[in-house]
Amino acid sequence: MGVARQEDLNSHTELQALLEELEFFVSESSRVKPMEARARFVTDQYRRLFEKGIVVRLNPNLRASLRDAYCEIKAVDEIINVAWNSGRGCNVWAINVNEASARLPVAKSKAKVACGALKAYLSTFES
């Protein structure tokens, strides 16, 4: 699969934390209603693993899947943030809330794909 070695338990544990972050997004994205309340989506694990060089060592397909998911999650998070920082009810708020509502299912779909790819990769580690 990737270059990360199976005996690298730290990477395995960190990738499991990344999987949990993605699964949390998939779960929460179903409940979020950008018009009703501000929501923030966490991308800390991905950013941390990217900075540590762990993401770079992964299989290119898995790496692309994670990148696509996290780019969309970050975009939705920023759009929601702009909406709520502009003041509820104004045109900027409405435009951004509508955009976030439209992009949320896309982000969820990409996150599900990334979850599946990451689960498959993690299953190659011995327990």
Image (cartoon, rainbow, N blue to C red):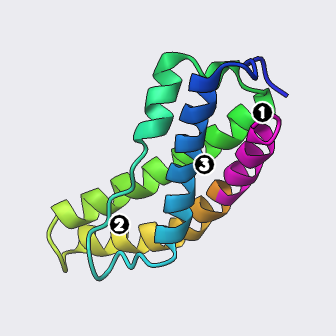
State the image coordinates of residue 86 (x, y, percent, origin top left).
17, 63
118 up-or-down from 24: above or below: above
How crowded pointer 3 is (Cα within 10 Å; few <14, some 14-19, many 20+) is rated as: many
Magenta residues (range): 112-127
Dot 2 corresponds to which residue?
Answer: 96
Q: In the rendering, which numbered label is found on residue 101?
A: none
Q: Amino acid at mark 1?
A: Phe
Real-space CA distance between mark 1 and mark 2, rounded to the nearest whole angstrom: 42 Å
How crowded pointer 2 is (Cα within 10 Å; few <14, some 14-19, many 20+) is rated as: many
1 up-or-down from 108: above or below: above
Q: Is residue 34 magenta?
A: no
Label located before the other in sequence (1 or 3): 3
State the image coordinates of residue 82 (x, y, percent, origin top left).
26, 57
Which residue is depicted at the point 26% across and 67% down?
Answer: 92
State the image coordinates of residue 98 (x, y, percent, origin top left).
41, 74
Q: Is residue 119 magenta?
A: yes
Q: In the rendering, which numbered label is found on residue 125?
A: 1
Q: In the rendering, which numbered label is found on residue 69?
A: 3
Real-space CA distance between mark 3 and mark 2, rounded to the nearest whole angstrom: 20 Å
23 relative position to 114: left or right: left
